[in-house]
């Protein structure tokens, strides 16, 4: 998320109650997660094993829970609970705006777009030309939709990321990481009925141009899906996955977080994808393997009873 105007790092430090170490003249331009940061961004880290990745990232300002050597030109904001400090900043710079009507006055809707009854369109939403939005679709604040997009009934765009920090010492264990990202649907996309596409924690969840989603598909926060992909019913894609162009995911495929499925890959129905896949191949199984290899393996598995009987005959 980018700020409307740059904010002095000294003001940020005072607001969250942090000790400022390093360059005190910096101006913050946004808030972002470590895998999305650009120069000027604020990020946070609260686990020592991630310190190096955070300190050496593009982030200019890092909220951290231990005083360490500050990289040249950057600033550290040191305090006990970076997670809560980050949430406090999100609530300041992207506060919740209650809706006052079904279609917000701040929404921009392009010429030729049809909005069916009972659609909710939140604040600061942008919808392009010649779209068709079917009944009971919900579009949260700040979503952006291109031209010629079709969204079928009951789909939800822009719900919060499923991202929590465990606090085992408390009766209520989980603190919510507030989301300030967006959902971006590029032109010529079709979204089936009952899909749920979560916004990024601080960046964007993106569905690329020409991609088609079937019914009942979940796309997790910060996932980027490329162009001209086909995704069949009941696929679940975890957060921050990257699906490259021309990928096909058949029904009930499960995709783990933080991985890449390469261009032109095909994953057959009911497969589980735990790690990145090379493009241009067909995969099957849980965990997935090359489909030809997996089908041969299954053929041999079916022969186990026959082979066992033969083995017993030999032993007799």
Image (spheres, rainbow, N blue to C red):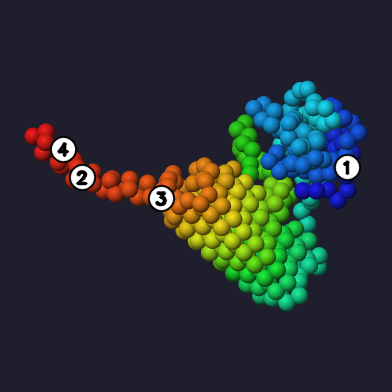
Looking at the rendered structure, the secondary structure element under dot 4 is: helix
User: Which dot marks residue 291?
Assistant: 3
User: Crowding at label 3, few (<14), some or many (≥20) Cα neighbours within 10 Å?
Assistant: some
Counting from the top left corner in percent of width and height, residue 156 is at: 63, 61
Q: Which residue is mark 4?
A: 311
Question: Can you give x and y, in whole percent of width and height, for residue 285 in the image?
Answer: 41, 48
Rendering coords of residue 80 (x, y %):
74, 28
Residue 217 disc label:
none
Residue 62, how many percent across, how many down?
77, 33
Query: For the residues marked 4 and 1, what is the alpha-carbon distance in whole angstroms?
Result: 76 Å
Mark-to-mark CA distance, 2 and 1: 70 Å
Q: Quadrant of residue 70?
A: top right
Residue at 76% across, 75% down: 111
Question: Foreground residue, 229 or 26?
Answer: 229
Q: Which residue is denoted by mark 1 in the rendering? A: 7
Q: Earlier in the sequence, mark 3 or mark 2?
A: 3
Q: Nearer the viewer, mark 2 or mark 4?
A: 4
* Residue beneath the point at 43% across and 45% down: 289
Position of residue 12 relative to residue 216, above or below, is: above
Q: Earlier in the sequence, mark 4 or mark 1?
A: 1
Res 301 → quadrant: top left
> Observer-nearest residue: 59 or 234?
59
Identify the secondary structure beneath mark 1: strand
Residue position marked by numbered label 2 in the rendering: 305
Could you tell which of marks 3 and 4 lies nearer the N-terminus? Answer: 3
Marked residue nearer the N-terminal end (3 or 1): 1
Cα separation, mark 3 vs mark 1, equals 52 Å
């Amino acid at each position: 998320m980018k700020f409307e105007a740059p904010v002095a790092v000294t003001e940020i430090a005072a607001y969250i109650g942090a000790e400022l170490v390093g360059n005190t003249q910096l101006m913050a331009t946004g808030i972002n997660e470590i895998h999305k940061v650009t120069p000027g961004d604020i990020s946070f880290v609260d686990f020592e094993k991630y310190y190096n990745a955070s300190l050496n990232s593009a982030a200019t300002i890092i909220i951290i829970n231990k005083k360490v050597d500050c990289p040249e030109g950057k600033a550290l904001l040191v305090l006990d609970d970076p997670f809560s400090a980050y949430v406090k900043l999100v609530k300041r710079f992207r506060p919740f705006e209650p809706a006052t009507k079904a279609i917000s006055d701040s929404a921009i809707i392009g010429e030729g777009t049809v909005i069916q009854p009972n659609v909710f369109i939140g604040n600061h939403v942008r919808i392009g030309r010649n779209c068709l939005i079917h009944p009971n679709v919900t579009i949260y604040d700040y979503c952006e939709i291109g031209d010629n997009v079709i969204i079928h009934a009951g789909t939800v765009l822009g719900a919060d990321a499923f991202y929590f920090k465990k606090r085992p010492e408390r009766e209520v264990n989980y603190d919510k990481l507030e989301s300030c990202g967006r959902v971006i649907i590029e032109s010529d996309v079709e979204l089936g009925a009952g899909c749920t596409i979560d916004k990024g924690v601080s960046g964007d969840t993106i569905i690329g141009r020409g991609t088609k989603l079937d019914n009942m598909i979940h796309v997790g926060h910060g996932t980027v899906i490329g162009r001209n992909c086909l995704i069949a019913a009941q696929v679940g894609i975890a957060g921050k996955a990257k699906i490259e162009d021309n990928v096909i995911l058949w029904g009930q495929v499960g995709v783990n977080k933080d991985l890449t499925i390469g261009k032109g890959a095909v994953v057959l129905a009911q497969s589980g994808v735990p790690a990145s896949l090379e493009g241009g191949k067909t995969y099957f199984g849980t965990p997935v393997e090359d489909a030809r290899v997996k089908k041969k393996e299954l053929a041999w598995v079916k022969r186990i009873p026959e082979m066992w009987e033969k083995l017993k005959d030999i032993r007799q």
